[in-house]
Amino acid sequence: MAYKYRLIYPDGTIEISDDSYSAWSDAEDAALYDCSCFEEGAEILALSGRNFDSGTLEYEIYEE
């Protein structure tokens, strides 16, 4: 049994991870890392003076 995750961007775009994980918690850790990178990137753009409405990056973990 393998787990993957999909990222759901604020505009509705869906991105599916290329990696498979043997444990649900490992897939969740990877998804949370991607979410934190998205938030950090949005903060950097905001600090540089760009008007960037990041919204919230969400994730779903599923079994393959």
Image: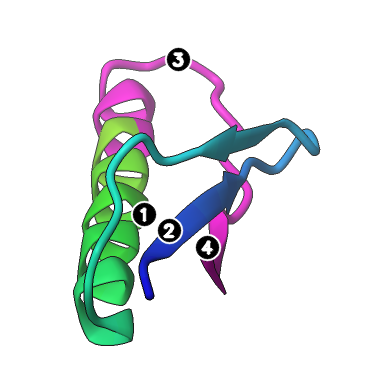
Answer left or right for 55 relative to 47: right
Residue at (24% x, 29% y) in the render: 44
Which quadrant of the structure image shows residue 40? top left
CA separation, marks 4 and 3? Answer: 39 Å
Q: How many residues crowd mark 4 within 10 Å: few (<14), some (14–19), many (20+)?
A: few
Lower sequence index among marks 2 and 4: 2
Q: How many residues crowd mark 2 within 10 Å: few (<14), some (14–19), many (20+)?
A: many
Residue at (80% x, 38% y) in the render: 12
Which residue does the numbered mark 2 point to in the structure image?
4
Q: Amino acid at mark 1?
A: Cys
Which quadrant of the structure image shows residue 2? bottom left
Lower sequence index among marks 4 and 3: 3
**Residue nearest the observer in this picture, 35 or 63:** 63
CA separation, marks 4 and 1? Answer: 21 Å
Which residue does the numbered mark 1 point to in the structure image?
35
Lower sequence index among marks 4 and 1: 1
CA separation, marks 2 and 1? Answer: 15 Å
CA separation, marks 2 and 4? Answer: 7 Å
**Chain part drawn in magenta:** 42-64
Task: Tell us which disc is closer to us: 2 or 4.
Answer: 4
Rendered image: mark on residue 64: 4
**Residue nearest the observer in this picture, 56 or 47:** 56
Answer left or right for 37 relative to 64: left
Lower sequence index among marks 2 and 1: 2
Task: Tell us which disc is closer to us: 4 or 3.
Answer: 4
Q: Amino acid at mark 3?
A: Arg
Q: Position of residue 42 (x, y in %)?
A: 38, 35
Task: Tell us which disc is closer to us: 4 or 1.
Answer: 4
